[in-house]
Image: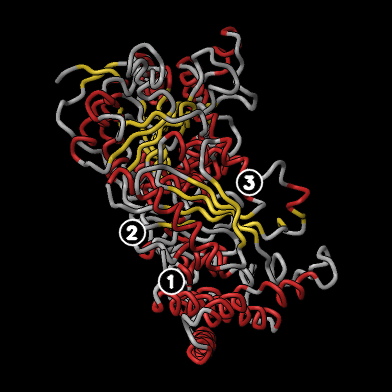
Amino acid sequence: MPMKSFRQAINEALRQEMERDQRVVIMGEDIAGGLGAPGEDDAWGGPLGVTKGLMPQFGRNRVLDTPITESAFIGCAAGAAATGLRPVAELMFVDFMGVCFDQIFNQAAKFRYMFGGRAVTPMVVRTMYGAGFRAASQHSQCLYPVFTHIPGLKVAIPSNAYEAKGLLAQSIRDDDPVIFFEHKVMYDDEVDVPDEPYTIPFGEANVTREGDDVTIIAFGRMVNFANQAADSLAASGISCTVVDPRTTSPLDKETILETASETGRVVVIDEAHPRCNMATDVSALICENCFGDLKAPIKQVTGPHAPVPFSPALEDLYVPGVPKIEAAVREIMGKGH
Amino acid sequence: MQLSRDQLRAAYQRMCLIRNFEDSLHEEFSAGNIPGFVHLYAGEEASGVGVCMHLDDRDAIASTHRGHGHCIAKGCDPRAMMLEIFGKKDGLCGGKGGSMHIADLSKGMMGANGIVGGGPPLVCGAALTAKTLKTGGVAIAFVGDGASNQGTTFESYNLAKVWNLPAVFVVEDNRYAESTASAWSVGGNQVDRAKGFGMPAQEVDGHDFFAVWEAARQAIERARAGEGPSLLHVKLNRYYGHFEGDAITYKGEGEIEQVKTEKDALMLFKQRVTETKLLDSEELTVIEEEAKAAIADCLASAKAGALPTEADLMTDVYVDYKF
């Protein structure tokens, strides 16, 4: 199986879905790039090159560069989805949701319910999230918990290139609006990715490590850190299960509860700020449903309740890294009732 | 371009349906029979009908808080609408949307909208669908003078222009955004704003069905021909408050009565078609009476309709979802 980067996997999913279904169009700022400028057409292919090459193949009618007006083009994607297209809109950074959130949570998310089940809104918003790029407070947030809160939206958060290709294909084929989160520091990370199209169903967690002592539940990029921590802890005799829920909405509650009950010790890793995030959500779920199986308090490892800082010295402290995860696991191994 | 007698009858019928629909809701709301917020379109009939007479089911419209008139003008079923506004299970949206979200996508009606300025971006999407799938359709954004100041509206003017979308923006300026006068809240004027985006635009007397119909004809033909978006600034008046229960303390004494006496859209229509002998007053009276009876019948259905139950609470959130 060929090794492909997260960037290539997303590009391939878009290309294959556009080949498969003429109704799939993509839109966003600079997704081709160079429009109206004297130099190269398809100059950028998105600011990080993720959509490079799609405009030459599919043309300007299906690969739509937009003005920098997120309200208009995200709303446009919602309106297009409700009337027969299957748009994939790129919200360059999820931090920009502030200028287009209405179109997502008041319009797209609610059409089906408000219109009595007589609407489908098959749109995808692809968006970059996460710290580690020295991009500072307005280009580094992990806002997936906000979207997870909204009924009507689905939220996918792939942890590597294989997951990204399958989850994006599913997002595009899905008849509900999906917010698809891409961690910006993962675009060059490579894993084996099949050439042929495939989908990964929503709401089915992936158990990436199986162990007896501690269950680590992690989201997006944090799954990779959790795997590294688990491998390192195994060398010192602590065996961990690692769960990648893949989607925060729907959430595979069954696998989370089952693996939590099996080990009785749970660490939840979430890069998002600590209040009302996926870690608190999953912790509450476990406490409510299998409290009796727990041998120790649940430990949450998250970003702090502070904006993402710019200085590399501070940002490195901000991101929950492998050492923090290992420390959390060791801490609850030493605790009991 | 001339309207046929059948088209004139259809236009008058729709305007009468809207007027009766809204007058009935006014009474029912006052009697405490309708839950929630209701924003009535009475007085503005010539605008919605004058525009929508040019549209069919491949065309889309997005509406405002004040959406009942646009719904009826676009061909939505008034009975299902009435049931919806009464919160009944057999309502147009199963009782889940209500007055502010009333919609029927099968008729190209993309919804009234609870968010001021919510519609224009959606209309860009419907226009993009029409353009991409080559349906020949156009999309119309109705916005009020209030929404005309929203960033979403300006962004949509720009997007529609740079993508050359088959879209028309219809600014229904009833002179008050809620209680605040558009004379105060709108900087510059609507036509100049549109021209600033390179869109053809014109001001229209929204009490005059024929003026709206002709202006809309030009804008919609332009859009269908691939010549891009345009804007109509339709100046009109609403007969009721911003919402039902609004005491309308911000309007001058006799302001509404004067419009009703001098510029009522139905009255002007009737004068025009009888004076030119296109229709006679007897057949217009029949249309009026039929509309009145039809809405009374819708109202009876709505009052008798069953309420949704707990089984309906969690349906229609998603097409497919594991809760």
Please report whichever mark, 1 or 2, sits nearer to the chain's N-terminal start.
2
Secondary structure of the residue carrying tag 3 is: helix
Instruction: Tell me which numbered mark, 1 or 3, is placed earlier along the sequence.
Output: 1
Q: Secondary structure at mark 1?
A: loop
Q: Position of residue B318 (x, y in %)?
A: 39, 55
- Whole-number angstrom distance, CA of label 1 to CA of label 2: 14 Å
In this figure, which residue is indicated by the disc labeled 3? B190
Residue B58 is tagged as 2
Residue A146 image point, x, y percent: 54, 40
Mark nearer the viewer, 1 or 3: 3
Whole-number angstrom distance, CA of label 1 to CA of label 3? 29 Å
Name the chain letter of the residue that bears numbered label 1.
B
The answer to which of marks 3 and 2 sits earlier in the sequence is 2
Residue A194 visible, this angle: yes
Looking at the image, residue B295 sits to the left or right of residue A186; the answer is right
Camera-nearest label, 1 or 2: 2
Q: Is residue A60 above or below residue B33?
A: above
Q: Residue A26, image x and y in percent? A: 34, 34
Residue toward you, A253 or A172: A172
Above-or-below relation of B235 to A220 = below
Q: Amino acid at mark 1?
A: Cys
Residue A131: % across, % down: 51, 19
Q: Which residue lies at the image location 36% right of the left edge and 63% below the top edge? A: B56
Residue at the spot x=53%, y=83% of the render? B274
Residue lying at 72% horizontally and 42% vertically, measured from the top left:
B187
Name the residue carrying label 1: B76
Q: Are marks 3 and 2 on the same chain?
A: yes
Same chain for labels 1 and 2? Say yes or no: yes
